[in-house]
């Protein structure tokens, strides 16, 4: 029996997300759009219904470029009063729909757009499902001059910080990936890391988890609500 590839699962959840949001959209709607390979498939399917909404807000320059290439207007978040939906991928999700994000270094803008959206829809292939977050190294965006200081504080929190060499975020900052964290309380750790001076944002989405998860498994796309 043939199994569905990870890429096909990403496409399936991207299409499922477009089907899920389509009835919620009208010609005034602005769609929040995430970053990464799953989000890229979402953008491509979203373009097929571009007549049904006004435009998008993007969580990265890369996604903005892809949206514009499809002719979808991209708005500055500051000029948008309301975002009905935000659709984005994840690096890990637990059953409470708490996430690790930031594998693509777009975590800060992703968290900002998620904060504004009425509904956050996470799209992920089945490999992202975990009982306990932390196998995927936790990305932390830092002000460049604070990198060593932040790394020392992350060691005190029990992690092994590794500088993601050569990566500068869309905000001009750097990324530390924190390995070997045991994330038994994601909300508490998210808050604790945010307290370190020099941290811009961390990739735990626990205080604002996803509202809906569309997860692609061999048997099909499953919808899980928080
Ligand atoms: C980018 C992200 C992505 O959503 C995450 O890395 C998942 O990426 P992909 O869809 O390529 O597996 O958080 O910062």
Image (cartoon, grey):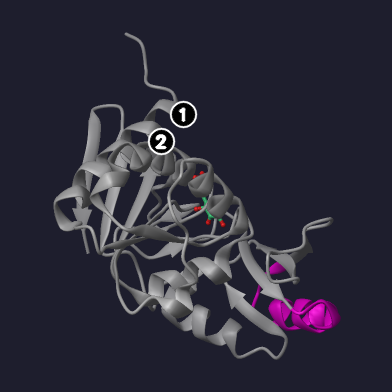
Magenta segment's dominant SS is helix
Residue ID for mark 1: 7
Residue ID for mark 2: 10
Quadrant of res 157: bottom right
123 up-or-down from 127: above or below: below
Neighbor class of circle 1 (other Cα within 10 Å; few <14, some 14-19, many 20+) is few
For label 2, being within 8 Å of ligand 1 is answered: yes
Which residue: 54% across, 69% down? 109
Q: Position of residue 35 (x, y in %)?
A: 52, 53
Q: CA distance from mark 1 to mark 2?
A: 5 Å
Q: Position of residue 58 (x, y in %)?
A: 49, 60
For label 1, being within 8 Å of ligand 1 is answered: no
138 up-or-down from 153: above or below: above
Magenta highlight range? 143-160
Which residue: 42% across, 44% down? 43
Q: Are marks 1 and 2 in contact (CB under 8 Å)?
A: yes
Helix, strand or loop under label 1: helix
């Amino acid at each position: 029996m043939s199994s569905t590839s990870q890429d096909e699962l990403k496409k399936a959840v991207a299409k499922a997300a477009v089907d899920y949001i389509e009835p919620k959209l009208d010609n005034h709607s602005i769609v929040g759009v995430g970053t990464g390979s799953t989000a890229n498939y979402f953008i491509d399917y979203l373009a097929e219904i571009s007549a049904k909404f006004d435009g998008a807000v993007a969580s990265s320059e890369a996604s903005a470029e892809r949206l514009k290439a499809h002719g979808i207007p991209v708005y500055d978040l500051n000029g948008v009063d309301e975002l009905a939906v935000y659709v984005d991928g994840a690096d890990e999700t637990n059953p409470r729909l708490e996430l690790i994000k930031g594998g693509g270094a777009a975590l800060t803008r992703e968290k900002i757009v998620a904060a504004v959206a009425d509904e956050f829809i996470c799209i992920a292939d089945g490999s992202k499902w975990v009982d306990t977050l932390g196998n995927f190294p936790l990305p932390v965006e830092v002000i460049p001059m604070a990198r060593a200081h932040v790394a020392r504080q992350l060691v005190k929190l029990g992690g092994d910080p590794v500088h993601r060499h050569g990566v500068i975020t869309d905000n001009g900052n750097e990324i530390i990936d924190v390995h070997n964290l045991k994330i038994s309380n994601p909300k508490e750790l998210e808050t604790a890391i945010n307290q370190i001076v020099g941290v811009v944002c961390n990739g735990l989405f626990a205080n604002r988890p996803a509202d809906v998860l569309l997860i692609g498994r061999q048997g099909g796309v499953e919808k899980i609500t928080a």
